Amino acid sequence: MEKGLLIVVSGPAGSGKGTVNARLLESPDYAYSVSATTRAPRPGEQNGKTYWYITREEFERRIAGGEMLEYTEYCGNYYGTPKKEAEAVLASGRNLILEIEVEGAMNVKKLYPEAVLIMLLPPSFAVQEARLRGRGTETEEKIRARLERTREELKYLPFYDYVVVNREGGADDCAEDIRAIVRAECRAIRRHPEAQAEYFAG
Ligand code: 5GP
């Protein structure tokens, strides 16, 4: 069986990555790996569904034990992808989506050069700002911090493979774009070094 593709989807606040990824996960050939974090659960979040919530000590023990595929410290908390769960998904032939921030994405690329890195963006910085304010759930200070962080995050854009723009109500279009990217990537010659030999052996 062919191994699944490792797909990293990053996106600044307001890019709608959760919604887009949920669309992809509706099909059985895509799977998600639940990350571990040391941050406290927010209302409505569930252990084992949104994240695995663990202590700093436990997280550091897992790092030392080589149990994390990648991890990062973000806003004072650890976030990481458990290796075992992620590798089980890939071995099953399903495509694994990692919804992680830019530093984690760079670590994944180093360890797994075959990973596909996709950046999901709102149509513009101005639209992003309007979306964040429109939510009406965050303080002005938090909104400013998220917008500021976006400038830092986008410095990593040249290291990504694809950019997908999420227009208003565009989650379905974005999911379709990502499926198209994955289909094309699966056919890339560099992923089939054995194609010539297999052709003549057949
Ligand atoms: P939040 O606290 O809002 O759930 O997540 C904060 C940031 O951490 C988001 O950008 C999210 O994509 C990222 N994140 C979530 N899980 C992981 C992970 O396992 N590894 C890394 N590197 N980032 C993660």
Image: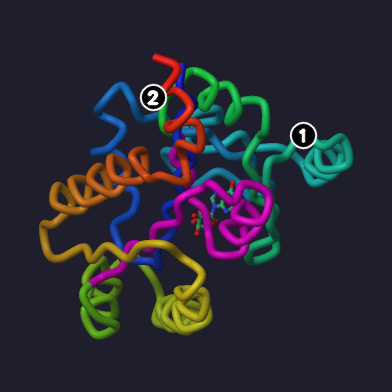
* In-front residue for pair 153/157: 157
At x 14%, y 52%, the residue is: 173
The crowd level at tag 2 (other Cα within 10 Å; few <14, some 14-19, many 20+) is few
The x, y position of residue 199, in whole percent, is 38, 24
Residue 141 left/right relative to 124: right
**SS under mark 1:** loop
The x, y position of residue 40, in whole percent, is 61, 47
At x 46%, y 16%, the residue is: 1
The residue that disc 1 covers is 67
* Tag 1–tag 2 contact (CB < 8 Å): no
State which mark lies toward you, 1 or 2: 2
The residue that disc 2 covers is 199
111 is within the stretch colored magenta: yes
The crowd level at tag 1 (other Cα within 10 Å; few <14, some 14-19, many 20+) is some
**SS under mark 2:** helix
- The disc labelled 2 sits on which kind of residue? Tyr
The x, y position of residue 149, in whole percent, is 50, 78
**Magenta-colored span:** 96-122
